[in-house]
Amino acid sequence: MRKDGEVKWVELFRMADIPVRYHTKIRSEANPYDMQYDDYFKRRAEINRKTAIRDRMFFSSDAYAKLTQWK
């Protein structure tokens, strides 16, 4: 209840509905300062960017709103 007496509803969602994402282990021989692995680290950065964009889109979309409603 607010200070002015108005009731405010807060919607919760279950954390179990959020998919678990595990980190990808970096190759043990890969060195970011070695030009031989430049493509490898560029590819990793691109994958991380795409994942971050997908996560931001999920949390700002209707999919997130659907998760906040009780099933």
Image (cartoon, rainbow, N blue to C red):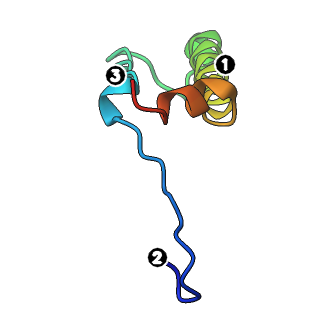
Q: Residues within 10 Å of mark 3 (few under 14, many from 20)?
A: few
**Towards the viewer: 10 or 63:** 10
**Towards the viewer: 35 or 69:** 69
Residue 33 in sight? no
Q: What residue does disc 1 label?
A: 46
Rendering coords of residue 68 (x, y %)? 49, 36
Q: What residue does disc 2 label?
A: 1
Q: Which residue is at a point 43% across and 18% down the rendered structure image?
A: 30
Q: Whole-Å distance between the Cαs marked 3 and 1?
A: 16 Å
Asked if the residue under mark 1 is in contact with the one under mark 2, i.e. CB atoms within 8 Å, the reply is no
Q: Amino acid at mark 3?
A: Tyr
Q: Amino acid at mark 1?
A: Glu
Rendering coords of residue 53 (x, y %)? 68, 28
Q: Residues within 10 Å of mark 1 (few under 14, many from 20)?
A: few
- In this rendering, would 35 be left or right of 11? right
Q: Whole-Å distance between the Cαs marked 2 and 1?
A: 46 Å
Q: Which residue is at a point 42% across and 46% down the rendered structure image?
A: 12
Residue 22's tag is 3
Residue 34, picture quadrant = top right
Q: Amino acid at mark 2?
A: Met
Secondary structure beneath dot 2 equals loop
Which is more N-terminal, label 2 or label 3?
2
